[in-house]
Image (tube, rainbow, N blue to C red):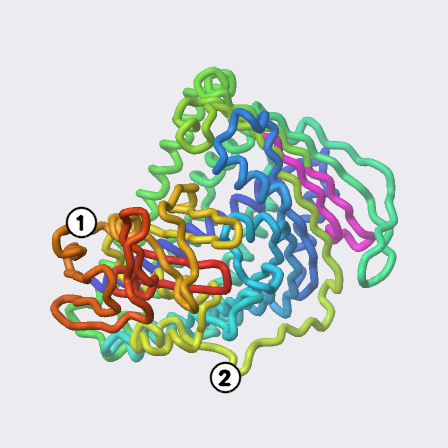
Amino acid sequence: MYFPIKTKLVTKFLVALLVISLALSLAGCDENAAPLKEAFMKNMEIKSSRGFSTLSITNNVPSDQLSQEALAVFSLLEKGLTMEFAMESIDTIGMQIALEGDDLLRMMGLWPYQEEPSIELLVNQNRFFIKSSSDPLYLVFDPADAFAMVPGGEAGLSFAYDPGYTKEQVEMVMALMETFMQDFDFSFSQLESLEEVELELPDGTVLTQVYKVKVDFEEAMDLLLHFLKFLAENEAFKNYMVESMQKPMQMLAEQEGIPQEQKMSPEEIEEFAEMAYQEFQKAILKAVKYLENNSPATLQQQFGLDFNAEETYYLDEEGFIRKTVSRYDIKAEHEILESILGTSLLDITIESEEITWDINEAVQVDFPSEDEQISFFALLEDPGLKEELGEGPLGLLVNFLTSAGRAPGGTSFIIDLEKQVYLLNGEAVELEPAPYMEGESLMVPFRALAEAAGGSVTWVAETRQVYYEDDSVELKFNVGSSKALVNGEEVELPVPTLLKGQRAMVPVELLDYLARDVSIRENMAFIIF
């Protein structure tokens, strides 16, 4: 049996389930909320639109109870992000995500670039494009490139990255969601029809009817339990799951270029699809059993869990949802949180707003030209292409993904000369002697950084020699010399090493032989071991 297609199917099913569950958790309602349910059904008719949303997360635990790292993260999340999107069709979408709080990002050493932090994400059928405001090119993830790298794979799996096949899969998911919404019958206890409100949107002033839904922890648990039972028993979902697994395997069995012994027979395909669905159904029923045996009161007592949600919807005269305002309050208390937050308490508020306009109007998403993009899978084949990405965030990401680190789990060092802040894996540390500039070279204390690379350092006072060794590198140099031996080969350093405060100081370029990546920008250095 051909394994890669199964892995692809499992990933697709998990994503499809997530999309369905998120939509149904708000769409399910009976006659007491018929207009709202109809609005969710109406939104299924949206084939093109534009939109804008905001998201922020506020910490409600006193700051002095949090660790410095957790406090920094929450400070950033409270600033939030904004997202503007354009949907040309259900499989052609462009998004611009802007991260607020760039001053905090810079202070934390996470964004050393001059441009304001933002990310552009484009989807064109099977192809994904990503680029930050500080990258010169778009990084492209195209399944066709991946399959082309597999000998014989392009011919055998061509259907899997065909735009028509992808569109058909998306349409199947949309049809299933529509069927689910029609049949789902959960009744919210706190649902209000409020006043009419005029909204000022980019496509004009729109008169809307406002509906508000409130859900407490007990009702949220009831909703989740109701949804899981519905999912486990729903024939439409079962048929979708089985058909979605059978069809690609049947198409694969018809393809040339794949050895006959790797293909599945019709009987094996049917058996595999049914077995996979049964395993999925068992997992759902196991979750149902857990929820039935653990009441909200029990979970509150054991984990301090509490949850409250409030959703406000603005419906236009055609029944489309033009604005959504959301607020979620989440609390928990457990000792396992101490290692993450510095306290056993979690108390956060998640708030978001979204508006939609140009519904089913002509919307165009602009994609980069060939000379503005570079394929991720081409980078895997030719690492020399990484130079074209430069030293922006994508360049660092690709280096991280394509380089094998020597230190267990990987280690990062950030050196901020201007603020004299040094971060080891995000935590502030002291470096003694402190790094400094010698001409155009950054001088760093060798032992502290070399040990972060995962090796051992030996100092021979009589000869003023330093030895470094790890699993793959042997390095030797004499203090005062501008030469070093790396695995027996002599290399030239931009400036001589020296002794300062009884510590060997070396130009950071020497660490190139120990690290995955060494990047220097103005008063900032990034070292990834």
Q: Secondary structure at mark 1?
A: strand
Q: Is residue 289 left or right of residue 304?
A: left
Q: Is residue 200 left or right of residue 33?
A: right
Residue pictured at 80% horizontal, 61% vertical: 202
Q: Position of residue 514 (x, y in %)?
A: 25, 60
> Distance of mark 1 from mark 2, alpha carbons?
45 Å
Residue pictured at 35% horizontal, 54% vertical: 10
Point out the tag, 1 or 2, that comes first from the N-terminus.
Answer: 2
Give the position of the C terminus as an image quadrant. Answer: bottom left
* 130 w.r.t. 413: above or below: below
* 331 w.r.t. 170: above or below: above
Q: Disc number at residue 322?
A: none
Q: Amino acid at mark 1?
A: Ser
Question: Looking at this view, is 161 or 349 the one in front?
Answer: 349
Give the position of the N terminus as an image quadrant. Answer: bottom left
Q: Position of residue 504 (x, y in %)?
A: 27, 53
**Magenta run includes residue 419:** no
Q: Secondary structure at mark 2?
A: helix
Whether residue 219 is visible, yes or no, is no
> Disc 2 designates what residue?
371
Question: Looking at this view, is 198 or 451 the one in front?
Answer: 451
* 228 w.r.t. 82: above or below: above
Whether residue 314 is visible, yes or no, is yes
> Disc 1 designates what residue?
456
Residue 152: quarter of image: bottom left
Q: Position of residue 2 (x, y in %)?
A: 23, 64
Q: Nearer the viewer, mark 1 or mark 2?
A: 1
Q: Amino acid at mark 2?
A: Asp
Q: Position of residue 354 (x, y in %)?
A: 70, 50
**Magenta run includes residue 313:** yes
The residue segment tinted magenta is 311-329
Residue pictured at 42% horizontal, 42% vertical: 427
